[in-house]
Each structure stands twice: as structure tokens, then as C-alpha cells.
Image: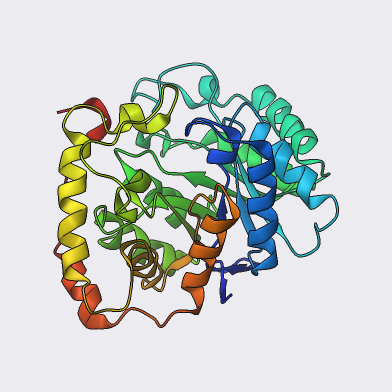
Amino acid sequence: MKLRKLGRTEFNVSEIGFGGWAIGGGWGPQSEADSVASLNKALDLGVNFIDTAAGYGEGKSERIIASVLRSRRENVIVATKTPPASGPWPPSPYCVAAQRYPEGYLRENVEERLRSLGTDRIDILQLHTWTRAWNRNPEPFEVLRALKKEGKVRLVGVSTPEHDQNSVIDLMRGGWVDVVQVIYNIFEQEPAAELLPAAAEAGVGVIVRVVFDEGSLTGKWTRDTVFPEGDFRRAYFEGDRLGRSVARAARVAEAIKGSGFTLAQAAIKFALAHDAVGTVIPGMRNPRQAEENCRVSDLPAMTPGLQQSLRGHNWRRGFWYAGK
């Protein structure tokens, strides 16, 4: 497993990290035994970076991670996320930062994260979403700075709002964040235009999520795939979205023929090809998935020619979450 520097932070992270959403629920049936086995397998294979969130099963993902790390915590970096207080998601331009991330709420939530993770200090605490409306006066990060000084957290960051990822650029340039978590994949390449270069210039670490486009870039599905009730993907790919995504993924699969990569491997290698990226965090729901994802680190880097070819598959879907 190759390691990378996470921006200018003190952390050297495995370039393949463990995405902890699915083990908390929301992606169809998931046994805790599989979750524990998957996480142990990933750690065995050199993963030293785990990403989770309060919202992943109301702390369930964090608690499973804590149970595994009780006997193997050394040198493992855990990032988690605090959601905003009740209100629209993502926050609207009319939301007030001090109402969605008030100091008392942030402090209470951080204490909850510490308890769930079984630790006295959080390696990386990220705000789970943001709005550009708060950039002129990012009050919540003043609170996070105080928590850093108090020793409750080591690094702070933000997970980008899906529809306006560039909203975090001002935070990076203003020195408010140590890390950002972004959506970057073969379909969603907009961060390469400005966000990723800005992160590199500011020395901000980059965590890449949704590298498989919520699964469409694994090549496992057809337009007839049906997701179970309660599975996040049932809504994400509703209507004709699944068929459109499968068709697009098939064209990517055609483009990588002869490269030696499977579609899923190419998806990971494409994201890792950008120098600003510190780690990608695919979900790993069982030991087999952990092996498949971790194995990618040992494969040759993607050639510049293939990278150039895949840039043509950038898909400007607009505001995907609102439907057509």
C-alpha cells in the first residue's frame, strides 16, 4: 500500500482509505460481522485512513470502527464529520451559519463523536456540508480552531456540498481548513479546474469520495438493477438515471480496453492520478471488496494518454439531486 502526504499536514495516509458510510447502513442489508471483517482486512492490507460520519447510522459506523480499533489503533487516522443542526440539506443561501453550526451544538456534537469513536481526540473533524453564503464570515471554523487549541481535534476540514463544490475554495485560501473532502471521479471532473489546484497551492489535504459514482463506475449493474428499500442508491438512481449512468459507464469500459485495468480499478487510478489527491475512500462492505480496492495501490499508475482519454467522459449532469 502506497502512502501519500495529506497536504501540508503531519499525516502520511494510505492512498486507498476506508469509506465508512455503508457499514453504518443506508446501502441495503449489511451485517456487522461483514463490516468488522472488511475493516480488519483493509487494515491488514495497509489501510491507515478511515473516514466516517455522525450521520452514518446515527454513529453506528463510528462505533463499529471504534470496536475494531481498540486492539489496533496505533498509526490509524480516523476522520469523522459533524452535520449541521436541523434545516435544509444542503444549507440554503438564507441559512445562518451560527444557527446551523452554533458553538454549543458543535461542542456537544464533538463530545458525542469522541464517545462514539472511543477516543479523547479526533484526528480529523469535518463539517459535513457547507454553503458559499457563509464564506465571508465562517464562524463555525472559529469554534473548530478553538477545539484544536483545546486538544479535542487535531485537524479540521469540510466535506463539499455536492452542487457547489467550489464553495470551499475561499475557505482553503483563507487558511480555515486543513483538509477538504470532495467528489472527484471520471464523471465528475469539475474539481480539476480550480478546486484541486487551489488545494495544492494552499497545502490543503484532499480526500476523494464517490470515486465509483455511487457504484455506477464499478460496472456491476445493468439498467434493470433494482436496489432494495432503504438503500440510498434507490433514490440517487431513480427514474432514468440508472440507465443513463450504466450507458455512460459502458463507454468508459470501452475506452479502457487493453489498459490492464478493470472499470473499478481505472476509476480509482484516475482519481489518484491528480497530484493534489491524498487518499480516495471507496466503501468496503466485505473482505473481498477490501482486497479488490486495496490491490489497486500496487498496480501501475495510469498513463498520461489514458488519463487524457478519460477526461472526455466528464459528465456535466447539473443539479443531479433535484432530478431532471
Q: In the picture, residue 65 is in which quadrant? A: top right
Instruction: Report whether 88 appears left or right of 139.
Output: left
Q: Does residue 89 appear left or right of residue 38 in this picture?
A: left
Q: Quadrant of residue 196?
A: bottom left
Label total for image = 0
Residue 227 horizontal/vertical position (percent)? 36, 31
Residue 109 in view in this figure: yes
Q: Residue at x 49, y 37 (%)?
A: 138
- What residue is shown at x 51% (from left), y 37% (from top)? 128
- Spot the residue most to the top: 86
Quadrant in which residue 323 is drawn = top left
Q: Position of residue 265 (x, y in %)?
A: 38, 67
Residue drawn at x 14%, y 64% is: 312
For the point 60% across and 34% down, the residue is 24
Q: Nearer the viewer, residue 68 or 186?
A: 68
One can see residue 155 in this view? no
Which quarter of the figure is the N terminus placed in? Answer: bottom right
- Asked if 264 appears above or below 85 in the picture, the reply is below
Question: Relative to residue 145, is residue 302 depicted above or below?
Answer: below
In this figure, which colouring scheme has been used for the structure? rainbow
Q: Position of residue 150 (x, y in %)?
A: 79, 44
User: Does 259 appear above or below 19?
Assistant: below
Residue 217 spot, x, y in % from top left? 30, 54
